[in-house]
Image: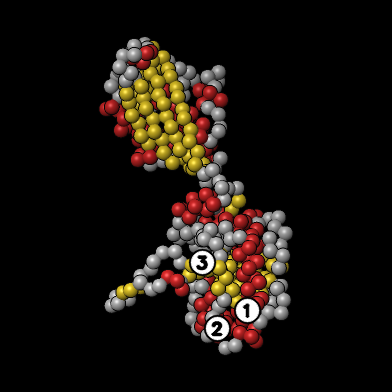
Amino acid sequence: MDVARFMPLTKRTAAVLACGGESRRMGRNKLLIDLCGKSCIRRSAEALAACPDIEKIIVAAPRTLWDTYSRELAGISTPIVFSEAGATRSESVKNAAALADGDIILIHDGARPLVSAAEVNDSIEDAFRYGSSVVCTPLKDTVRFSDGEKSFCPSRENLFTVRTPQTFSVALYRAALENAPGDFTDDSQLIDALGITPHITEGSYRNIKLTTEDDIALARQYLGGNTLRIGHGYDVHRLAEGRDLILGGVKIDWNKGLLGHSDADVLVHAVMDSILGAASMGDIGKLFPDSDPAYSGADSLKLLEEVSSRIRAAGFDIENIDATVIAQAPKISPYIHKMTENISRAAGIAPECVSVKATTEEGLGFSGREEGVSAHAVCLLRKK
């Protein structure tokens, strides 16, 4: 089939944002994942809206998500309409293509939020010149072909990784939809089926697709977001008679306990301060002041639950906690396993993400004289 009969007359473009996937490998809706202050779908849409040739953005998505996505895309100047996602990608894009105006249709994965304005503009320009454009990047890795009988490494000089956007003359794309047999996972395969070779537009390696959690971390790194935050916490309490000794939520049989307004759990207090410090949210004295009678005798693990809840509400996940108790006596090691379990449960993370250690100061200082107990903690947070 001759591509010349399908050549576009203008660069007037309708962009299709393909958002019909189920994010099965991610385990959550990746289009709503926050990437340094903006959702994935908004970043993808804004990249399309920045192109002056794009007159309309058609979001192909399940109807149940139209309201959610509308809120995410509020304020984007380019007109946005929705089309129903189908059972397959081909069906979803076919539904969207029916709403396309102009001479060119650009199709982009909603899960590729780092596409650049240059890639979008270059793809439209090449579609105008050649009738089609598939953004690709030269393959970096050596690949091996195997069909069970023969196996070899093809030359990577002529191999490319296919990305989006993929841009076509509207007339060509509609002809492909009508005439190409079967279902396709990639829009350029439709053009192949017509016997037409799509034009390759070289793009950027940064134009990644969010598929796994590793991709999210990489996208945030590309965006320059400070996704990792480290905090340090320190606390000390005096030993006194007539008080229970509670460390890490464990009541230890000892002739003295720690003096304080709450249960004086010095270990959990240090942990809380390390979490709050990493998030720049103050300290436990600010959140739970000792002047407030509501916290008299308070269970510090309950306070840790509250701190963890506030941290997550602020957009952070707790990656790991490392803490050290400094006490001459009693011996802490028999209780470390239970302390670890208590802290991990209150913080909402796995036990293997919590480390609790204990040491003495060899008889030196206030802890060495058994006047008090102190604790240090370090926490690593990740910005969602």
Q: Are marks 3 and 1 in contact (CB under 8 Å)?
A: no
Residue shown at 32% from the left, 20% from the top:
360
Q: Position of residue 194 (x, y in %)?
A: 54, 85
Between residues 251 and 375, which one lies in front from this camera angle? Answer: 375
Residue shown at 40% from the left, 24% from the top:
375
Q: Amino acid at mark 2?
A: Ile
Looking at the image, tell me whether mark 2 or mark 3 is earlier in sequence order.
3
Please tell me how crowded label 1 is: few (under 14), some (14-19), or many (20+) other residues with Cα within 10 Å.
many
Q: Nearer the viewer, mark 2 or mark 3?
A: 3
Question: Label 3, on which residue?
Answer: 137
Q: Nearer the viewer, mark 3 or mark 1?
A: 3
Question: Which structural element holds mark 2?
Answer: loop
Up-down relation of residue 332 to residue 171 (above or below): above
Spatial CA distance of label 2 from label 3 is 20 Å
Between residues 112 and 123, which one lies in front from this camera angle? Answer: 123
Please tell me how crowded label 3 is: few (under 14), some (14-19), or many (20+) other residues with Cα within 10 Å.
some
Quadrant in the picture for residue 172: bottom right
Q: Quadrant of the N terminus?
A: bottom right
Q: Position of residue 301 (x, y in %)?
A: 43, 30
Q: Position of residue 247 (x, y in %)?
A: 37, 25
Question: Label 1, on which residue?
Answer: 131
Between residues 357 and 345, which one lies in front from this camera angle? Answer: 357
Quadrant in the picture for residue 166: bottom right
Q: Which mark is residue 196?
A: 2
Determine if residue 179 is in view.
Answer: yes
Q: Could you tell whether 383 is left or right of 271 in the image?
A: right
Q: Amino acid at mark 3?
A: Thr
Q: Position of residue 323 (x, y in %)?
A: 39, 30
Up-down relation of residue 275 to residue 54 (above or below): above
Determine if residue 56 is in view.
Answer: no
Q: Amino acid at mark 1?
A: Gly
Q: Could you tell whether 331 is left or right of 160 in the image?
A: left
